[in-house]
Amino acid sequence: MRAGLFLATASLALTASAHYVFPSIIYDGEPTGEWQYVRQWTGEYANGPVESVEGADIRCNKDGDNGNATETLSVTAGSTIEFTVRSSVGHPGPLLAYMAQAPGPAADFDGSGDVWFKIYEDGPNIAEDGLTWPTDGATTVNFTIPSSIPSGDYLIRVEHIALHGAGSEGGAQFYISCGQLTVSGGGSGSPSPLVAFPGAYSPTDPGILINIYWPVPTEYTAPGPGVWSG
Ligand SMILES: *[C@@H]1O[C@H](CO)[C@@H](O)[C@H](O)[C@H]1NC(C)=O
Ligand SMILES: *[C@@H]1O[C@H](CO)[C@@H](O)[C@H](O)[C@H]1NC(C)=O
Ligand SMILES: [Cu+2]
């Protein structure tokens, strides 16, 4: 009886501690402050996920539409940007990144409308006991800013989708942060396709409602549009 209670408590603690958040950017090898260039969302201290793809929080997390407490980082097109993970990616699932050009300063942009294009997604390893992803346990993640995007201000949205409980609808967990960037040295590309958040995902997308363990899937398609090739 006592042992059973202890086990139940221990596994609850393990579940909570497996949560994570993306609080800061490392650029050009230089760490920046937590929530300096990344929009601090309400409740971030708990590292918890967004659980609905249909609510406003799927865009930039809870209250992440407001950028006036956040600085905007100068970066160059074609360079690599890294996000820190607090404390590490604790669940299996894909890593995705999107950008959206702001009509004015990034701090003033709420990210609404068909403005988001995908710049990155990773794929799984298919093993005998289920799907695994390369970010398992990662303490930082990184992507390249496409070299041909037009110069200007952007939001960058980093997203890790945890699929350990995704076999039933509503079970996937979305770990999301948005950063503010001023891109220089860009080109004349036309990023596409452009999608809206919410809107880009449905709770029954095959990359969101999926049992990654059994029967072991033979393929995996991440939700959202294809990656813009730049
Ligand atoms: C931040 O932005 C919100 C909404 O745009 C505005 O209502 C608020 O006054 C701003 N706060 C500051 C400190 O500028
Ligand atoms: C960038 O991410 C890849 C995985 O996508 C990883 O292999 C590589 O080590 C990362 N680079 C840095 C500098 O963290
Ligand atoms: Cu978790």
Image (cartoon, rainbow, N blue to C red):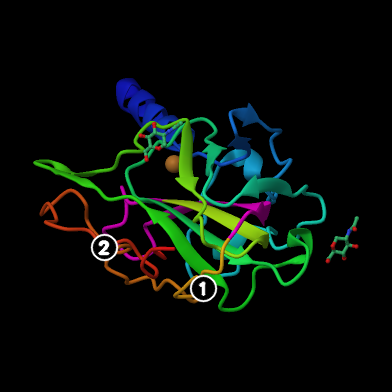
Dot 2: few (<14), some (14–19), or many (≥20) neighbours within 10 Å?
A: some
The front one of 131 and 100 is 100
Q: Quadrant of the C terminus?
A: bottom left
Left/right placement of residue 138 relative to residue 25 reads left
Q: Residue furthest top?
A: 3
Name the side, left or right, on which 181 lies relative to 170. Answer: right
Look at the image and give the residue range highlighted in magenta.
161-186
Q: Residue 190 carries which label?
A: 1
Residue 173 included in the magenta stretch of the image: yes
- Which amino acid type is marked by label 1? Ser
Image: 136 above or below 186: above
> Residue 33: where, in percent of width, then height?
71, 33
Examine the rendered structure and indicate whether residue 157 appears above or below residue 38.
below
Residue 114 lies in quadrant: bottom right
* Residue at which label 2 appears: 221
Of residues 214 and 192, the one nearer the viewer is 192
Nearer the observer, 127 or 118: 118
Q: Is residue 80 at all visible to an observer of this figure? A: yes
Mark 2 or mark 1: name the one nearer the start of the chain.
1
Q: Which residue is drawn at 40% across and 36% down?
A: 90
Percent across and percent down for residue 44 are 64, 44
54 lies above or below 118: below
Element type at marker 2?
loop
State which mark lies toward you, 2 or 1.
1
Q: Which amino acid type is marked by label 2?
A: Thr
Q: Residue at x 26, y 62 (%)?
A: 221
